[in-house]
Amino acid sequence: MKKSYALFVAGLAMSLSATAVTKTADKTVSALEAQEMYSASQLSISNRVSNRPLKAAPMKAAGVENLVGGYEGFYDQIYENDPMKGRLAPYFMKGENAGELEITRLPYSDITMKANLSSDNTKLLIPAQNVLYRESDGKWLKFQAVECSVASDGTITMDKFLDNAEGVIMEDGTIEFPENVVFSYIFDDTTLDDFSFMWVGKYVSIKRYDYLDFVESEWIPVGKGQFTDGWFQSQFFNSVQGFTTEDVDVLCNAKDNNLYAIVNPYKSDYWTELESYQNADGMPRDGYIVFSVENPNCVAVRPFVPCGYYVDMAQPSQTDPNPEPDPQMGYPYNVEGQLHWYDGQSFDEIVADYASAGAPLSTYNKATRTVEFINLYFGYEMSPLASVYWVNSEQDRIDWMVSKFIMPDLSGINGVEMENADAPVKYYNMQGMEIANPAEGQLVIKKQGNNVVKVVM
């Protein structure tokens, strides 16, 4: 089906005030389109980032697969015109060789760098490397880590080119680079005496986003619900009257009976026909939408949960007006979910802030079992917390992006199931013999109260 609306990718503009607040570097920044170069004389400690992740004890990573995913990055901004303002949103992919990673959006979306996990799995090494050839001037743009020193007046001096930027992998998943090391993009003929750069960032720390590790055995089936999507149908229709409602399976979390999951909301034939990227070979189509009804006046959709729907994130540019399709998994959420799970606000705090501003929130009507999701945004694989929404031909946000969900009839279910959740767990093999400590990967029978299921450990 032909799209009626275009994508708009914003920063995390979730503020209720007139000034938008960007929490991460979700804007696309192209190195090919960056023209201006800056000199070392413009460097100083002008904007130190104070809310970088906390330090923790070093640990070993089991392998590069533990590092794959989206990250939030912090660094000291040391020149005034820095477009990223001390924030990064890099994405790590597994490289072709053993122990190798590929990193993009650090900060440029059109640059992919090579990196390596150290042999003892405690450090990430990003070597100096040519990353982009600019035909306009016949020069190579190079990633270069530089050791620096800071004078008492805040002036920064570049002292030594380094073979690698070495980041220590911390206990909480943070990768922290030394305070006296600067990441830079320079041309390959740049010297320390005549240091000019396209972008620099000092004292870089990056931390993997808090993806939901969805283990279905930790959730309880509670029946069928009716889901009307507004995150992605909004691109195809001129009003909610064109939306389709579908029956979906619903799960309740075994430890939190206010936390629900819509199972495979975009896996039906309807979505396959609506979006051709759903048919791509090898693309997983399983996914969830996870939300909390703990406060019925503030229903929060959890970020960092893949939903199974793919969005073409290819964006035309001056250098590539007709890009190849770039289908990426969608990560739907709402503002309430970002404020609660990412910013750490309580539901009561969110309700109070929105009430004072006269702004609406997503709600749950227990009498009609209806959840109305508003304040909708979605991210994508490379940037799961990007604030993406749909705009019309005048670039105005369409104001009817609403999702609705009719919950299953939960009367008589929650009490029994939650009682099961408190019961002791026993495991049995396929022959019915009880097992004290099932092995990882073993198929077993799990019995908890009167609930019996087969699970893989």
Image (cartoon, rainbow, N blue to C red):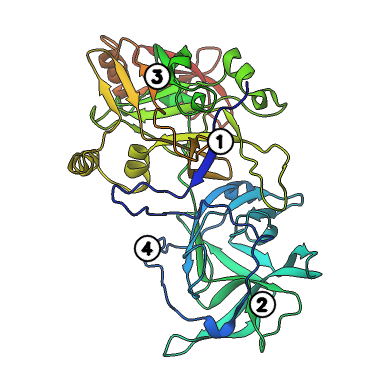
Q: Which mark is residue 51?
A: 4
Name the amino acid type tagged 3.
Ile
Q: Is residue 148 left or right of residue 50?
A: right
Mark 4 or 1: the one toward you: 1
First in residue order: circle 2 vs circle 4: 4
Callout 1 crowding tier (Cα within 10 Å): few <14, some 14–19, many ≥20: some
What residue sits right under mark 2 in the picture?
Answer: 162
Write down the quadrant of residue 302 in the picture.
Answer: top left
- For the residue labelled by badge 4, is the local secondary structure a helix, a strand or a loop? loop
- For the residue labelled by badge 1, is the local secondary structure a helix, a strand or a loop? strand
What residue sits right under mark 3 in the picture?
Answer: 220
Write down the quadrant of residue 369 in the picture.
Answer: top left
What residue sits right under mark 1 in the picture?
Answer: 6
Residue drawn at point x = 33 percent, y = 38 percent: 336
Circles 3 and 2, Cβ within 8 Å, touching? The answer is: no
Mark 3 or 1: the one toward you: 1
Q: Nearer the viewer, residue 68 or 32?
A: 32
- Could you say where residue 93 lies in the image, as x and y percent from the top left? 65, 48
- Could you say where residue 449 lies in the image, as x and y percent from the top left? 34, 15
66, above or below 299, in the image = below
Q: Which mark is residue 244?
A: none
Name the amino acid type tagged 2.
Leu
Residue drawn at point x = 29 percent, y = 47 percent: 16
First in residue order: circle 4 vs circle 3: 4
- Does the rendering let one see residue 289? yes
First in residue order: circle 2 vs circle 1: 1
Circles 4 and 3, Cβ within 8 Å, touching? The answer is: no
Name the amino acid type tagged 4.
Asn
Mark 3 or 2: the one toward you: 2
Name the amino acid type tagged 1.
Ala
